[in-house]
Image (cartoon, helix red, strand yellow):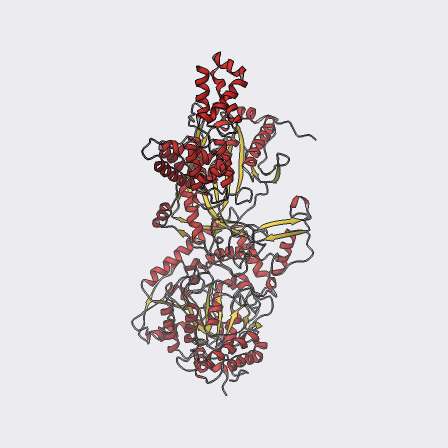
């Protein structure tokens, strides 16, 4: 039986509004120990080596909350604009499964440490086009303002962020698709059991798969900047479930939702939601109901399949954990956390733009990664200092020019070279600022510097990479190109001045990339205009 | 040559320190007493002779090196079988944990052993501490040393009987709704349930986590004070988030006078149905003993106590259901062979591993916590908890301790109480201080005129007022003669006194 033909996402979204909410689990990987015991957190140790009576749920063992985990979740809450609850409790959520040795998971009840926050999501570029123009209303029906380029901002409400413990890892062998049913053997690794986990739940404020993807990216950036997790979707330290339902454009009533699991990459998140929206639309358009169920994304077959229905809803018998007293957070504690908060990516992007006059794109890219932005700022300081020293007396490059060049190096060159120091990046930037290096040469130089402690000023000569800015030396090259490219010369003289770019390229090629392109342009123009 | 059972824990420790006898001699005497007496009493589920002799040898070696000995040096101690001790099994008297080897040692056990005590063995109990007679033990019943046709009380019946029959000087029990004080009363020994949080619960298999508290049994209040100092002198346990610091100077305050202090009595409680005349007479005797030492008696009210049993039988089963969920036969404990699915293995392991009462409590808890039912029972029960705690706060604004029975009656015969709700009523006087979390102690008063069985009074103190509570208990002990003379403490049950265990 063939799959029913699904309409393209863009078509579906013209008729239907997708209502999307996310549940995001993040392991607090930067902590040293587990949530309720002193066992070391690790991802790659031999199975069942970081275990103790507490995380193995042995009779008589008791949980003791990890204070650093509470600090981390308060940080996350503050970064997401949440109200930090001065009193909250841990609850027990019961289910019989060997991945949780106690047969209950310690989590939080109706009141979580962090409640009712908001993250503003900027959607721009191609992704912005996924939301049809006529659907420009946010969750509360307020009109979304679009910029001229189509970009817009969605306020995404955060329902809560609560603290819980992760389960053990299970591997089933001998059965179908690694499931426990029919398996001949099941392996349990309790190293992960008890890992501190924070679960963030959004309100259903997202409307397109692209918004969901961007939201996850933003959350990942934010948590990484806070330093509370490595947020790896691949290794599972950050996991996301998507809830999605459809309703006719203009309707306010919510449709039946499905929950999609196994979204272990940004692409999976986007594609699974897109598939699910198309699948639900196909059902609804055919007059069939959407079943409330949990569905599993199969990346290889690019589809979701039903995992289990909700009619057998589990009763988790939640009640306050009597081993853990209600948690009182003092104002002093919350303020001490607030005072230690690092600069968040949005604020950093704005500051980089303001302080260094960077382009939005460059500033945003640099602000993405706290390590990169720190190295960038270090390199700008070094390059500015270097430029001042060498240009004493003469005009030299403007501070903004230096910063723009360093940003260019960081955004467009450095990602390929992981082990270049800030000082080396500053040195290469200075060579670019002084026109002593072409961009192509800069790439070559960085490749040579990567992973060494060599000085760019020395290396550039040793490699014979310095850009030639000597008119006499470049003159033969210009002559040769003008003689050879008679057609382009004629076009130029007929008024097509843009063709000079082609001629500059030819000069660069003829000089093996060592000639100064600005000088070539100037010399070519003089000759052609005479 | 005297029998070991004539010596209090403090006398043993002093004698070992002074070199009157060695810890090894004491340990052998205790093991002899167990061999001679326990076939009839059946207080022990496991006797840890090797551990006892090793611990005793290390005390003797320390003395030989000239080291100062710790306060419980050489004192034979028994532990309830829900307390983990490496080198022993911890079964909670359940088939579910039959043969389960303790993988670590409970903090309370560790601290008593650190104080030099010698671990003689693990004592019988109601299965997972569900009961008031020790009859629900999956392995065997325990006899009351004062009349072996009667129960020792429960759930810590084995610990109470081991002390009452003179096999050990001290024992630890746990008390969730009266499981130390009621068996102490049935067996005529002193039993203290400290305030919640005073003694660590780490390593004690949980029944009702918000109610459970570990405490000592002894034949003299002084011995109980000695044990409390050992349990608390290292401060709060970092492995138990609910444990708290308290002042560890029980022994030092033991003989603080009660003159000028106030004892509260609760008239309505003395009208509780089923309260026997001999127990009522015992309370009158206790009141007179305290008044004669200058304590003033006032009437106080605890109006919400009437709801304590109802609230307890909501809260305790809910917590028990949750705490016992881990016994699924997957990684330890009884595992049903030959099952084709995990669900079936779990179901059958539990069905065959747990006894009647354990199933009853877990089913009750599973029902009470289920959605729809939870709001109807769990919340009101917690509200009652708040009301009872307030009652106590009001009462302790007017008095320093409250005097009441520990049990409405003396020990009953095996099989005499078979209706579970009637069994639950045995805890009428003890449950409220588990609900409120304050400390309570059961102090023997002698034998009842009608039954000839031990009768006790219960003294309850404000939360974390356990030091003064023990001073009250000591004053009561000073004022009554349990058969050894005024202030001498409780005697070993006559049928066992002096049998084996010569020192």
The location of residue B17, given as percent across then percent down, is: 44, 81
The location of residue A209, given as percent across then percent down, is: 53, 32
Outermost top residue: A494
**Total numbered labels placed on residues in the image:** 0
| Vertical order, B275 against A462 (above or below) | below
The location of residue A211, given as percent across then percent down, is: 49, 32
In depth, the one of B208 and A226 nearer the eye is: A226
Note whether residue A65 is visible. Answer: yes
Outermost bottom residue: B1
The location of residue A496, given as percent across then percent down, is: 48, 14
In depth, the one of A327 and B177 nearer the eye is: A327
**Res. A10 image quadrant:** top right
In depth, the one of A267 and B50 nearer the eye is: A267
- Give the side of residue A366 with respect to residue B334, left or right: left
**Res. A286 image quadrant:** top right
| Vertical order, B444 against A98 (above or below) | below
- Give the side of residue A327 with respect to residue A243, left or right: left
Outermost left residue: B260
Note whether residue A121 is visible. Answer: no
In depth, the one of B201 and A459 nearer the eye is: A459
């Amino acid at each position: 039986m063939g799959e029913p033909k699904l309409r393209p996402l863009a078509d579906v979204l013209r008729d239907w509004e997708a209502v999307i909410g996310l549940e995001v689990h993040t392991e607090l990987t930067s902590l040293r120990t587990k949530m309720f015991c002193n066992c070391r957190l690790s991802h790659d140790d031999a199975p069942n080596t970081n275990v103790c009576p507490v995380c193995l749920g042995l009779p008589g063992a008791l949980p003791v909350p990890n204070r650093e985990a509470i600090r981390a979740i308060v940080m996350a809450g503050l970064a997401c604009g949440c109200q930090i609850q001065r009193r909250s409790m841990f609850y027990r959520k019961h289910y019989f499964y060997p991945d949780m040795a106690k047969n209950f998971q310690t989590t939080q009840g109706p009141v979580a440490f962090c409640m009712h926050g908001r993250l503003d999501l900027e959607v721009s570029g191609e992704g912005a086009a996924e939301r049809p123009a006529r659907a420009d209303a946010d969750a509360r029906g307020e009109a979304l303002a679009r910029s001229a380029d189509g970009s817009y901002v969605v306020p995404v409400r955060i329902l809560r962020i609560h603290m819980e413990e992760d389960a053990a890892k299970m591997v089933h062998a001998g059965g179908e698709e690694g499931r426990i049913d029919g398996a001949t053997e099941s392996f349990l690794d309790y190293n992960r059991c008890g890992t501190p986990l924070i679960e963030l739940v959004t309100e259903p404020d997202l409307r397109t798969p692209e918004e969901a993807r961007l939201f996850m990216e933003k959350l990942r950036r934010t948590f990484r900047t806070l330093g509370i997790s490595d947020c790896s979707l691949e290794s599972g330290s950050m996991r996301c479930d998507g809830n999605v339902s459809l309703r006719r454009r203009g309707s306010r009533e919510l449709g039946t939702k499905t929950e999609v699991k196994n979204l272990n990459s940004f692409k999976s998140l986007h594609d699974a939601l897109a598939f699910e929206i198309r699948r639900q639309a196909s059902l609804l358009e055919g007059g069939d109901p959407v079943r409330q169920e949990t569905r599993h994304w199969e990346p290889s077959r690019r589809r979701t399949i039903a995992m289990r229905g909700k009619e057998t809803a589990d009763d988790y018998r939640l009640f306050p954990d009597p081993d853990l007293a209600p948690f009182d957070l003092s104002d002093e504690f919350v303020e001490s956390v607030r005072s230690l908060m690092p600069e968040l990516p949005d604020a950093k992007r704005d500051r980089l733009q303001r302080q260094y006059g960077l382009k939005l794109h460059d500033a945003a890219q640099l602000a993405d990664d706290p390590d990169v932005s720190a190295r960038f700022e270090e390199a700008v300081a070094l390059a500015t200092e270097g430029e001042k020293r060498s240009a004493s007396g003469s005009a030299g490059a403007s501070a903004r020019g230096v910063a723009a060049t360093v940003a260019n190096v960081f955004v467009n060159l450095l990602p390929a070279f992981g082990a270049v120091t800030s000082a080396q990046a500053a040195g290469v930037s200075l060579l670019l600022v002084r026109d002593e290096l072409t961009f192509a040469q800069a790439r070559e130089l960085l490749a040579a510097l990567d992973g060494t402690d060599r000085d760019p000023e020395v290396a550039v000569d040793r490699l014979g990479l310095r850009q030639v800015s000597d008119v006499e030396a470049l003159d033969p090259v210009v002559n040769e190109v003008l003689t050879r490219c008679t057609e382009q010369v004629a076009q130029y003289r007929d008024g097509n001045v843009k063709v000079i770019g082609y001629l500059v390229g030819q000069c660069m090629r003829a000089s093996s990339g060592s000639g100064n392109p600005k000088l070539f342009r100037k010399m070519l123009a003089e000759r052609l205009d005479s | 040559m005297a029998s070991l059972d004539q010596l209090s824990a403090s006398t043993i420790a002093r004698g070992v320190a002074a070199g009157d006898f060695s810890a090894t001699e004491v340990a052998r005497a205790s093991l002899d007493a167990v061999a001679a007496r326990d076939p009839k009493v059946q207080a022990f589920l496991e006797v840890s002779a090797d551990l006892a002799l090793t611990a005793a040898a290390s005390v003797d070696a320390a003395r030989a090196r000239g080291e100062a000995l710790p306060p419980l040096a050489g004192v034979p101690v028994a532990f309830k079988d829900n307390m983990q001790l490496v080198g022993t099994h911890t079964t909670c008297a359940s088939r579910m944990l039959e043969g389960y080897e303790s993988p670590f040692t409970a903090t309370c056990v560790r601290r008593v052993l650190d104080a030099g005590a010698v671990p003689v063995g693990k004592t019988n109990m109601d299965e997972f501490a569900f009961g008031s007679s020790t009859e629900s033990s999956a392995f065997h019943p325990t006899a009351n040393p004062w009349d072996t046709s009667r129960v020792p009380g429960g759930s810590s019946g084995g610990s109470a009987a081991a002390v009452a029959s003179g096999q050990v000087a001290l024992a630890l029990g746990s008390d969730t709704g009266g499981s130390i004080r009621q068996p102490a009363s049935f067996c005529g020994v002193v039993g203290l349930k400290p305030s919640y949080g005073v003694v660590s619960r780490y390593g004690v298999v949980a029944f009702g986590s918000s109610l459970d508290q570990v405490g000592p049994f002894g034949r003299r209040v002084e011995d109980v004070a000695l044990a409390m100092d050992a349990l608390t002198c290292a401060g709060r346990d970092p492995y138990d988030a609910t444990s708290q610091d308290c002042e560890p100077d029980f022994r030092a305050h033991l003989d603080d006078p009660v003159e000028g202090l106030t004892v509260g009595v609760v008239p309505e409680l003395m009208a509780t149905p089923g309260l026997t005349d001999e127990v009522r007479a015992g309370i009158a005797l206790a009141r007179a003993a305290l008044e004669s030492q200058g304590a003033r008696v006032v009437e106080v009210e605890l109006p919400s106590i009437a709801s304590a049993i109802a609230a307890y039988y909501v809260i305790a089963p809910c917590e028990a259901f949750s705490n016992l969920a881990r016994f699924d036969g997957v990684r330890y404990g009884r595992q049903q062979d030959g099952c084709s699915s995990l669900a079936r293995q779990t179901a059958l392991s539990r069905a065959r591993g747990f006894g009647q009462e354990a199933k009853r409590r877990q089913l009750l808890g599973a029902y009470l916590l289920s959605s729809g039912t939870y709001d109807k029972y769990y919340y009101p029960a917690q509200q009652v908890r708040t009301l009872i705690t307030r009652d106590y706060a009001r009462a302790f604004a007017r008095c320093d301790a409250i005097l009441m029975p520990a049990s409405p009656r003396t020990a009953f015969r095996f099989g005499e109480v078979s209706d579970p709700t009637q069994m639950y009523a045995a805890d009428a006087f003890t449950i409220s201080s588990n609900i409120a979390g304050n400390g309570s102690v059961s102090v023997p008063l002698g034998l009842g005129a009608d039954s000839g069985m031990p009768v006790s009074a219960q003294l309850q103190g404000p939360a974390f007022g356990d030091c003064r509570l023990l001073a009250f208990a000591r004053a009561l002990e000073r004022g009554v003669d349990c058969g050894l003379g005024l202030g001498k403490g409780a005697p070993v049950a006559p049928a066992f006194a002096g049998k084996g265990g010569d020192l």
